[in-house]
Image (cartoon, helix red, strand yellow):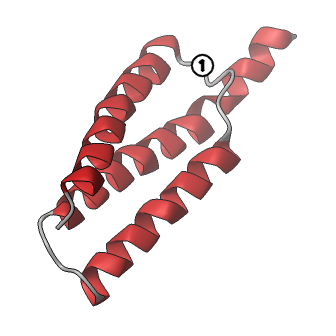
């Protein structure tokens, strides 16, 4: 187990709830990149698979929690993306 890996995931993990709250409160996804979100999600999934197959420890839960926050953020992106189009017209 790497304390640095856990620290990185904790720092990212503190960022996602803030992003979710901002999106939910504003009902806007202006400035968000869903492609970036999917790439980060892919990274989390790779981390999860690595933990499952090579190095199972508690850090897997940090990957899972972060991935769930990110999936929720992606869902909100698709829910609110049309709000940005309406605001531009």
Establish if 80 lies above or below 33: above
> In the current view of this chain or complex, which residue is farthest to the left?
58
At a point 72% along the width and 20% down the height, the residue shown is 84
Q: Residue at x 44, y 50 (%)?
A: 71
Instruction: Give the quadrant of residue 49.
Output: bottom left
Give x and y (percent) for residue 70. Answer: 43, 46
Q: Residue furthest right?
A: 89
Q: Position of residue 33 (x, y in %)?
A: 68, 37
On-image quarter of the C terminus:
top right
* Residue 51 image offset from top left, x and y in percent: 27, 77
User: Which is more toward the observer, 24 or 45?
Assistant: 45
Q: According to the image, label 1 marks what residue?
A: 28
Number of marks in the image? 1
Q: Identify which residue is drawn at 53% across, 64% down.
A: 42
Secondary element under disc 1, as helix, strand or loop, is: loop
78 left or right of 15 in image:
right
Specify whether 68 is left or right of 87: left
Say left or right for 61 vs 29: left
**Corner quadrant of residue 8:** top left
Q: Residues within 10 Å of mark 1 (few under 14, many from 20)?
A: many
Which quarter of the figure is the N terminus placed in?
A: bottom left
Q: Position of residue 53 (x, y in %)?
A: 30, 89
């Amino acid at each position: 187990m790497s304390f640095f890996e856990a620290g990185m995931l904790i720092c990212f993990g503190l960022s996602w709830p803030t992003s979710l709250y901002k999106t939910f409160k504003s009902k806007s996804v202006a400035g968000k990149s869903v492609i970036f979100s999917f790439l980060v999600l892919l990274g989390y999934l790779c981390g999860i698979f690595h933990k499952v197959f090579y190095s199972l420890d508690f850090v897997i839960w940090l990957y899972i929690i972060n991935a769930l926050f990110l999936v929720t953020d992606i869902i909100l992106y698709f829910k609110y993306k049309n709000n940005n189009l309406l605001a531009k017209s």
